[in-house]
Image: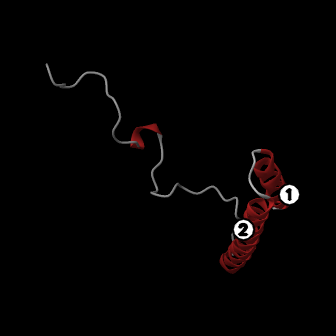
Amino acid sequence: MSDVVRWAAFSCVLVPVVLVGYGTSLAGAAGSALGLVAVTGVCRLLLRQSERGTARLVEEQGAKPDDDRRGRHGRTGAGAHRGGRHAGGSAPGD
């Protein structure tokens, strides 16, 4: 998570500098910086809450988070996918 926070802080500084460089007023750049700081703070709180919830769920289930499990729909193997192009078959114009 520290990398995410570092990049967010970097963006909160970089964006206003770029805005001023392109001719935006200082007040506009400061407003953008405050907005980015607010969004970053909320995202950080949500990320922390999600991590705690996941840790709690893993602890309750007694499983490791890296367990090998089937995907979202429970399909396995190469032939499980549907759709796409197929060799042969009927096509418009056959």
Q: What residue type is labelled 2?
A: Gly
Secondary structure at badge 1 equals: helix
Q: Which mark is residue 35?
A: 2
Depth order, front residue of 33/50: 33
Residue 15 x, y percent position in the rendering: 77, 53
- The quarter in which the C terminus is drawn is top left
Q: State the image coordinates of residue 49 (x, y, percent, origin top left).
A: 71, 76
Query: What secondary structure is found at the residue carrying circle 2?
Result: helix
Residue 13: % across, % down:
84, 56
The residue at the point 46 percent across, 56 percent down is 74
Q: Name the residue under label 1.
A: 6
Measure the alpha-carbon separation of dots 1 and 2: 17 Å
Q: Which residue lies furthest to the left in this view?
A: 94
Q: Earlier in the sequence, mark 1 or mark 2?
A: 1
**Placement of 68 over or under 37, stated as above or below:** above
Amino acid type, label 1: Arg
Which residue occupies the foreground of this view, 11 or 58? Answer: 11
Res 82 quadrant in image = top left
Question: Is residue 91 found left or right of 60 in the rendered image?
Answer: left
